[in-house]
Image (spheres, helix red, strand yellow):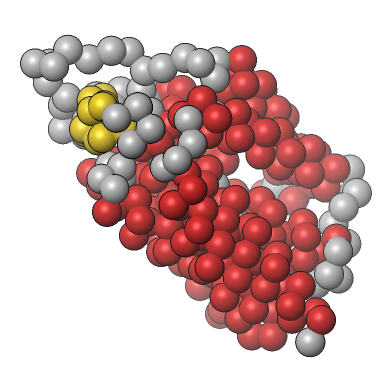
């Protein structure tokens, strides 16, 4: 009974945190399950992917109601994310988990530091009468109490990163938000609130693709998955509501901190430390 309660708590914290920063709960769930609750790594990844689906579904409802999600951009980038998730197994046959952890750990260190340094930077101002293009959008920022308009730039960069993020999501069960949020924020001119909301929507579809592989291999353990998903659902509901009450700069710093922590985790995993 105690173990089930701990699984629920791990899911709740992962869902709340993942929903707030648009990264999915896997960045928290996988290491907690493996390091503290003695869950085998494959079962932890499978449970994490199922949890990411719950995080995305629950959090996206709130973000959609608030008008923060860019549906056209999300659907466009999701094509690359889904292909990446389905081909994650092929990449895994060429690169070891340790190699992937080391490479992406190094990349995320650089990205997290850059986001921390540029936390007060904002997307280029857009004149009220300027066109936003096919993927641009408008939303109301509840914190600043004003309308935010933004065009979307460098779509090709977003699709490329989406392909890579999908691969990593399928392989490690951590969701692709740790790559899609920074690239939308820093490379595609999408404000942090819209980046988090759009990423939250995309994560669920991507995780479904990866979870199918684990379901087919019989690696989804209901005893682990059910408590985690229940906790994640409640946490994601709370996290998505709290996110709208925080400054954009606070969300950016929080995202950078999560990225740095995940980078350390992945680098340690590459050295054989942390995962069993």
Q: Is residue 128 visible to the viewer in this orientation of the structure?
A: yes
Q: Quick check: 166 above or below 139?
A: below
Residue 164 showing in the rendered view: no
* Number of disc labels: 0
Q: Is residue 161 left or right of residue 143?
A: right
Q: Quadrant of residue 157?
A: top left
Left or right: residue 246 versus residue 171 is left
Q: Position of residue 10 (x, y in %)?
A: 70, 65
Q: Residue at x 69, y 79 (%)?
A: 224
Name the spot of residue 242 as percent of width and height, x first. 49, 48
Left or right: 30 in relation to 84 = right
Q: Looking at the rendering, in which quadrant would you find the C terminus?
A: bottom right
Q: Give the position of the N terminus as an image quadrant.
A: bottom right
Q: Position of residue 213 (x, y in %)?
A: 55, 71
Q: Residue at x 30, y 23 (%)?
A: 153
Query: Which one is in front, 171 or 70?
Result: 70
Q: Position of residue 56 (x, y in %)?
A: 44, 59
Q: Is residue 164 above or below residue 237?
A: above
- Which residue sits at x=60%, y=70%? 231
Q: Nearer the viewer, residue 64 or 52?
A: 64
Specify the quadrant of the image occupied by residue 31. bottom right
């Amino acid at each position: 009974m105690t173990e089930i309660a701990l699984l629920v708590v791990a899911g709740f914290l992962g869902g709340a945190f993942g929903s707030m920063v648009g990264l999915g709960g896997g960045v928290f769930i996988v290491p907690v399950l493996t390091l503290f609750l003695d869950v085998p790594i494959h079962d932890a990844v499978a449970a994490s992917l199922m949890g990411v689906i719950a995080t995305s579904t629950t959090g996206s409802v709130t973000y959609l109601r608030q008008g923060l999600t860019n549906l056209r951009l999300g659907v466009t980038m999701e094509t690359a994310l889904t292909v990446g998730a389905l081909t994650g197994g092929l990449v895994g046959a060429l690169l070891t988990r340790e190699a992937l952890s080391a490479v992406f750990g190094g990349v995320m260190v650089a990205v997290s530091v850059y986001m921390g340094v540029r936390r007060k930077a904002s997307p280029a101002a857009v004149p009220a009468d300027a066109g936003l293009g096919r993927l641009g959008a408008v939303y109301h920022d509840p914190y600043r109490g004003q309308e935010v308009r933004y065009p979307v730039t460098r779509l090709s960069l977003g699709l490329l990163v989406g392909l890579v993020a999908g691969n990593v999501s399928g392989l490690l069960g951590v969701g692709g938000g740790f790559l899609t949020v920074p690239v939308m924020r820093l490379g595609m001119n999408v404000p942090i609130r819209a980046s988090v909301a759009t990423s939250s929507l995309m994560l669920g579809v991507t995780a479904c693709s990866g979870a199918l592989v684990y379901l087919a291999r019989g690696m989804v353990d209901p005893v682990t998955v059910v408590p985690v998903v229940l906790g994640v659902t409640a946490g994601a509901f709370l996290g998505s509501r709290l996110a709208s009450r925080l400054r954009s700069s606070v969300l950016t710093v929080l995202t950078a901190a999560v990225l740095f922590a995940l980078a350390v985790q992945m680098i340690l995993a590459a050295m054989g430390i942390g995962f069993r």
